[in-house]
Image (tube, grey):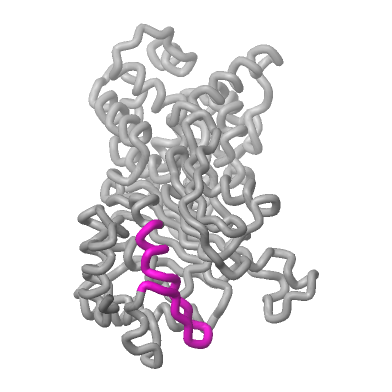
Amino acid sequence: MKLPRSNDELVAYMKKHGMVKTPAIIEAFRAVDRGDFATPNLGQVVYFNRPVQDGDVHLSAPFIYADALEELSPRPGMSFLNIGSGTCYLSYLVSMLVGELGVNHGVELNEALLEHSARCIASTDERLGRNTDIQVLHGNGLRVAVEPGCGYDCVYVGAGCDPDLTLPYLQGLLNVGGVMVVPFREELIRMERMADGSFSIRALCNVCFSPIVMADAKKEGFRGTPEPPPAVRFVVKPWSPLCHSVYPRSFRETVLNVLMANAREDSLPGTLPPALWMEIMGFARRDWFSESAIVQEREATARSKRTGGGGGGSGGGGGRKGKGKAARGNRGGGGGSMDASSSSSSSSMITSGCLGAARTMALLPVRAGSAAATQVVAVRSVVSSCLVKEVLWSGNRQVAGEGEKPSRLTKRRRK
């Protein structure tokens, strides 16, 4: 049997043997030349259906990447994490599938590979006339700091893992409906997070991967591992109209409902200008308006009522005492207010005084480092963590026409 000796021949070979079936994935393999992510020393061997290695540069067999992409099924706007991204060949294939609005992150412990992958991405971008937004950071793949509500739709792990040591951490990286392809011991596994929090797991094929470097490897005598292995924190893109389409459906519907309610004079969202709502949404977490978040909010509200109301977070009870103290009371503690538990317990304490403060501060001309700038940040923290939920959910109810009893905020404003 003739072995493939070019990228086009490799794609034809994979199609013939049923390794790839999805048209978009086939086109991605055709556009991204596997040889561009290898070294010149490997020559045409890089197009054989087998793993290749030259020093630090290693590429898994093409069928492994094909299986991974077919199972992950990346689509435009999805988020992807590549643990042990290596040459970034797979990351670039994914970039062709998730598009410009997708999130494409990689983690690599080997600094030499980071430099190699950066060159490969740049040269492929130049050849294809693209400007790929792939964030690849140096660090340990088992120490990725994932912000709440900012998990991934697709995750690929390029090193062998022990499920007894890594499973809980890896599961925490996935969004609901998210899929991970990971080698557990000698099997390549597909793992999907279900809506009820459980995981569907099935084996794909037998594989042999080098073991992943554990976060405490230095203590175990693993030479060459940084001390300590660096944790990784990616920049999370805030909501904006440009990336609206990549946010969860519940989030998109909330934005739409609130902007519709904002146009009504008798609505609670109408108390703030539309431009401020657009900015506020940039502070809201991706998971705030999901079904599970709403259930948690209701449970927290019920607990708060049973215990007599509770405190209002690090800003204290400033919201009950008028406009001026609402801003002052939260100036020092706004940063912690993005926590879901604190926001849920304090949403019931927001008053029309905070609405007035938000309107006033939003219109103030501010100078960096000034007291006014500090107050703007404080008010934005209050609005984003507490008022957003009360007002946005109010907007959802008003647009839906639900006959729920108006909140204390609504009653007070209509007097």
- Where residue 268 sits in the image (x, y, percent)? 36, 21
In the picture, the quarter occupied by the C terminus is: top left
Name the residue nearer the viewer: 306 or 204: 204
Farthest front residue in view: 1
Name the residue nearer the viewer: 351 or 261: 261
The residue shown at (39%, 20%) is 394
- Where residue 332 sits in the image (x, y, percent)? 63, 46
Question: In the image, is residue 276 above or below residue 52?
Answer: above
Span of residues in magenta: 49-67
In the picture, the quarter occupied by the N terminus is: bottom left
In the picture, residue 325 is in which quadrant?
A: top right
Question: In the image, is residue 111 above or below residue 66?
Answer: below
Can residue 99 be seen by looking at this rendering? no
* Callout count: 0
Farthest bottom residue in view: 41
In the picture, residue 217 is in which quadrant?
A: bottom right
- Where residue 324 sits in the image (x, y, percent)? 54, 34
The residue shown at (49%, 42%) is 149
The residue shown at (38%, 40%) is 281
Question: In the image, is residue 4 above or below residue 181?
Answer: below
The residue shown at (41%, 56%) is 80
Using residue 378 as the reference point, say whether residue 17 is left or right of it.
left
- Where residue 50 sits in the image (x, y, percent)? 41, 74
Name the residue nearer the viewer: 36 or 16: 16
Can residue 412 be seen by looking at this rendering? yes
Q: Is residue 53 magenta?
A: yes
Using residue 186 as the reference point, say whether residue 119 is left or right of it.
left
